[in-house]
Image (spheres, rainbow, N blue to C red):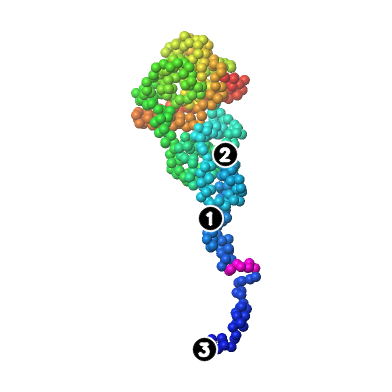
Amino acid sequence: MSALEIFSRQIPIRERREKLALKPKPEHANDDTPTGQSLFSRRRDIINQMLSPTIKHFSFDGSSFNRRSISPFLRDYTSSESQTTTMSMSTTTTTDEFELEPIERLQQQQQTTKPKWDREQLLQLSDTVRASLNKNDNASTTPVPLSPFHAFKLHEFLVTALNDENTRNPTLDSDMIEYARLDKMVGELLQYNNESTTIQQARDLRKKWRNRFREHLFMMDRHRCAVLVGGGRLKDVAFDNSLEYDLGKWHTTTKLGGLVSEVEGNQSFEPGHWWLNTTCAERDGIINGSQEKPTKGRYGFTALPLLTGSEELTGGSTVKYVREGGMADMHIALISQVGRQIRVLRGYRLESILAPVAGLRYDGIYMVKQYGCKYDVKMGKYRLQLTLERKAGQRPFEEVRRVPKPSQLDDWALYEKLEGDKVKQMLGQTRYLGWKLRQQEEKVDREQWRRAKFFRASFSTGQERGHT
């Protein structure tokens, strides 16, 4: 007989059951375990608590849970408008319930709240911010204090752009950055070495752009130059090395059409319109030739480009233009225009505080008040004196003189580089060095003249501000 059989015969069945019921519980178990909860379910809860709160998991019983499916970035990124839209979807939805939604649904909602970029508004913001950062001593790029509105817009853009960079598919593409010159705005902001929030945001944004666009971010100027020639400001304009005219070696490849009425001409050009050179203005029809003389353009309206010589303010809206040279330089055709209105364009080589710092700018309609010409025997030259008065009711000249804007000066820098490359390629290294030397000497002379002129003007009665 086995030992098991002997044990079963000696101990009754009921007593054996009572002994089995008094079996001691394990040491790791205690009385804190809730009634009806097994050790397996308790171990399941401990593991669930150890899992990441930001990742969607499945519990052991098959049900899904998500402690926080929305990241702190998404909560910061969601605007008041998107929150209102989310709450309007269900009147019973609360903030806690919103945070417990699946991550896929939140990403789908984020797609509907992505920022909508306006390239023209971004370009305007970039020009305004860069103009306020400019420290040049000339009239056209005098630093303009950034208004509270534009300061807020700048902060809003930096925050929105940073949030957009943190999404899976950023909406601010390279074409938008290139067109609005946002890369240059951010770069000029970082020239100020301080620890302000705006500078830190600009630094973070440039770092994210460099990581996303890499070498393409550094090649934007090359692409801008291609756009400038292909369909931009140099459209239908070609470089001609056979021209000896010292104000430019460009010619237009298009022919002027028939005359257009004066009304249509006034609608086509507003004060502040800007070109790289006279050939571009000829292409658009405001003048009929690249030389410095009065002509009638496509619109049958006499236009006078003031490219060289000097100009002085005589008070209010009146200026006196002085020019010396031969008889061919005396604008004899303007004698018949005394008492009439003409269009006046100013070039960057004109010695005037009203002239632009680069290119050619249309400054509005002027009336020819007086024409005078006399011969200086001692100098052996003719001297022209022309009195012009700006017509009232036009765009204020304080706005006009801010042209060219920083983005236009970017095009001017590309234009000068392109012209230098053309000179080197077609005329050779020697003539290129001579051309470059003359360009630098003229630039230094203009800067010195402007600096001295504005220094004297700071002690005057401020007549330059009264030009309207």
Q: Please state the horizontal and vertical placement of residue 19, each as a whole percent of the image.
A: 61, 81
Left or right of 244 in this view: 105: right
Residue type for callout 3: Ser
Vertical arrangement, residue 276 with respect to residue 108, above or below: above
Looking at the image, tell me whether mark 1 or mark 3 is earlier in sequence order.
3
Residue 193 seen in this snapshot: no
Q: Please state the horizontal and vertical placement of residue 330, each as a whole percent of the image.
A: 45, 13
Vertical arrangement, residue 325 with respect to residue 75, above or below: above
- Magenta region: 32-39
Q: Please state the horizontal and vertical placement of residue 363, each as a whole percent of the image.
A: 51, 21
Left or right of 241 in this view: 386: right
The residue nearer to you, when weighing 381 against 236, is 236
Q: Main secondary structure of the magenta part?
A: loop
Residue 241 seen in this snapshot: yes
Vertical arrangement, residue 7 with respect to residue 218, above or below: below
Residue occupied by mark 3: 2
Q: Please state the horizontal and vertical placement of residue 182, each as a whole percent of the image.
A: 50, 37
| Residue 55, numbered label | 1
Mark 1 → mark 3, Cα distance in angstroms: 59 Å
Residue type for callout 2: Glu
The residue positioned 50% from the left and 10% from the top of the image is 338
Q: Residues within 10 Å of mark 2 (few under 14, many from 20)?
A: few
Residue occupied by mark 2: 156
